[in-house]
Image (cartoon, grey):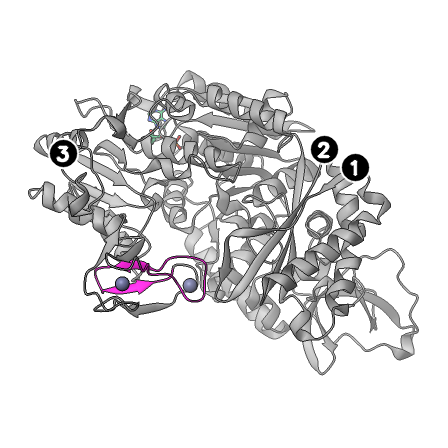
Amino acid sequence: MAEIVVSVLVDAPRHAGLTPALSYRSQHPLEPGLLVRVPLGRREVAGLTWQVGEAGFARTDELREITEVADVLPPLNADWCALVEFTASYYQRSVGEIALAVLPPELRRLGRAALVDRIRRLHRAFNAAAGGPVASEPVAADGEPALTPDQSAAVAAIGAAIGAAAPGTTLLHGVTGSGKTEVYLRAAAHALAAGRQALVLVPEINLTPQLIERFTRRFAGRRIVALHSGLTPAQRLRSWLAAQLGLADLVLGTRLAVFAPLPRLGLVVVDEEHDASYKQQEGARYSARDLAIWRGRREGVAVVLGSATPSLETWQRAEAGRYLRQSLPERIGGAAWPAIRLVDMARLPKATVGLRAETRTPALAPQIVAALHERIERGEQSLVFLNRRGYAPVLQCGECGWLSGCPHCSAWRVFHKQDRTLRCHHCGLAAPVPRACPECGNPDIAPVGRGTERLEEQLAALLPEARIARIDADSTRRKGTLEATLGAVHAGEVDILVGTQMVAKGHDFRRIGLVAAINPDSSLFSSDFRAPERLFALLMQAAGRAGRDAASGTPSEMWLQTWHPTHPLYQALARHDYAAFAASQLQERRSAGLPPFSHLAVLRADAKTVAVARAFLDAAATAARTLAESAEVMIYAPVPLDIARVADVERMQMLVESASRQRLQAMLRAWLPHLDALHLARGDAAQRVLRWAIDVDPLTI
Ligand code: ADP
Ligand code: ZN
Ligand code: ZN
């Protein structure tokens, strides 16, 4: 019997020295995209049959045989395989690593028999839930509102795109509450009516239940599944199978869902497309938004990017006409945009509560306290946010000046008053607060600065009548507490909600009339060129929490406590003029040669010492300069990360930049083998970097 050589991808990093795919023997020809189990060394691992250029070169008598083929699943189609190959090539990883990593872990673990059983159970569950044949028309369901003219225009444009040969990407630009989600729902209805599947991506797991509920209500009788890392392995496998088998009509998920196999895909929505969580920060550092756009183009599927504050990359493409733009300039129900009030801290009288040096209490503008008081009197809710958790960012000794640094990181340990600990937010080191200064024994050690815990305490002292709740990573650590607090807010049992940016995202609060940002300045003068973009987005999003309910008489307002009230960013915010903000930022980026007018990648190196990390990056730079492909690529000097040392590891990075994406890509591809070699060649273990990685299109620099 003729034996056939089949190429199989296994999960192996590029530098493991394995060729992109391994060769195995098979009794039958196997098409690409099939899940298999193969022997690898002494183990048996999951693999995927793959199409490779030069197959069949190996001598079959030396090859091992494929153990099992999961032929109960249809092969992953060519579009999916192409997405994986593109991801690997663009983000400089191995194809095998990407292909296997984006499959549900359970799928890789289970054998054929177990899969047969899971698939049978899935069919049974779906048939029971549907209670009969699935309607072919979207159910004209309960509570479908009549669209506003702007929404109608957007839906018509996206609907036309769904039917077009080259649908392209549409930017749906609208503030919170302008009715974007309603547009997604209608667009999805279009796709479903055409017998296609829709993929809806959201930035946060926390936002999926709300969205699922909304889609479920609208699309009664349709099969909707969630796909994100918060699911149990069994749930995730189930959702994935439903997508791959074409059973699910709608897949809602976070960034990893961009890799969901969807044989009937007809629409991709990326909500809050500017959100940083779409970029994976470890392993393959892919951008799910960018991959969604790539996928849409490859598969001829309409892509909708929604945001109140699009990323400048997206905005620039819309300006250049590469994306269609649909705007929803008004909030539904005519709710007015909150009035933006800037408190100039420099003008507060020095004697004002909290400004006195001897109390060492950070200031809280009396105007804001009075405004909060008024809202409480009217029975309205307020949201006060501060992007720093804990009680105080550092403790200080009044005698010798000792500060509560972390012994393992170049960062302060944060004082948490509730459990009286000093905690490092970078390495996790936690210890009880010392009774006295560890340096000089002085018992008077005091908090400096303010986090959400202290803000909550300050507000409670100034507004004793207020019912205050706090939402941040500390207060919501226990499972269910976030839901409970949000529930209390919705039920009107909370007057003031204090929190970090966690509270600014996505939640649809009905009764919030006032939003206050206590220390927005902290990211105004950051060394990261994207910091203003992020701050503007965050403040717009926070402002969007206010006054969603037009019926609530009093006009809503947003207060900003700042030392720089005339800063153009705040001025643009006050006019809620994203376009002006974007235009000025784009102009700066253009003259500085920054994205989107150039393309960046970062080479990162982690090592036990700065010298080792620097030596690796220096050697990498030297290697890069010998490459012909580096001709039009700038290679910058290595610099430490913002927080250089975390858990006793020194972290450095080196930026490479080019005006041309293709050139940068070509350079990275040529560079990688040198980096692998460099890593292996550098002397004994002590001379080696612990880790190195390339981040293409990095979000933070
Ligand atoms: P966004 O996604 O932009 O925040 P939503 O789609 O959630 O906006 O709309 C905000 C609110 O207005 C929701 O409660 C939604 O049900 C409602 N809504 C949306 N479109 C309409 C419409 N055309 N008529 C009436 N209510 C609408
Ligand atoms: Zn001291
Ligand atoms: Zn630490």
On whether ligand 1 comes within 8 Å of the CB at mark 2, the answer is no
| Mark pair 1, 3: CA separation | 58 Å
Residue 422 highlighted magenta (yes or no):
yes
Circle 2: element type: loop
- Label 1 with label 2: CB-CB less than 8 Å: yes
In depth, the one of 578 and 35 nearer the eye is: 578
Q: Earlier in the sequence, mark 1 or mark 3?
A: 3
When the figure is inspected, residue 177 is found, relative to residue 699, above or below; the finding is above
When the figure is inspected, residue 450 is found, relative to residue 545, above or below; the finding is below
Q: Position of residue 582 (x, y in %)?
A: 51, 24
Amino acid residing under circle 1: Glu
Q: Position of residue 509 (x, y in %)?
A: 26, 37
Residue 659: which numbered mark, if any?
A: 2
Q: Which residue is mark 1?
A: 632
Q: State the residue at coordinates (68%, 50%).
A: 91
Amino acid residing under circle 3: Ala
On whether ligand 2 comes within 8 Å of the CB at mark 3, the answer is no
| Mark pair 3, 2: CA separation | 53 Å
The span shown in magenta is 402-424
Q: State the residue at coordinates (35%, 36%).
A: 520
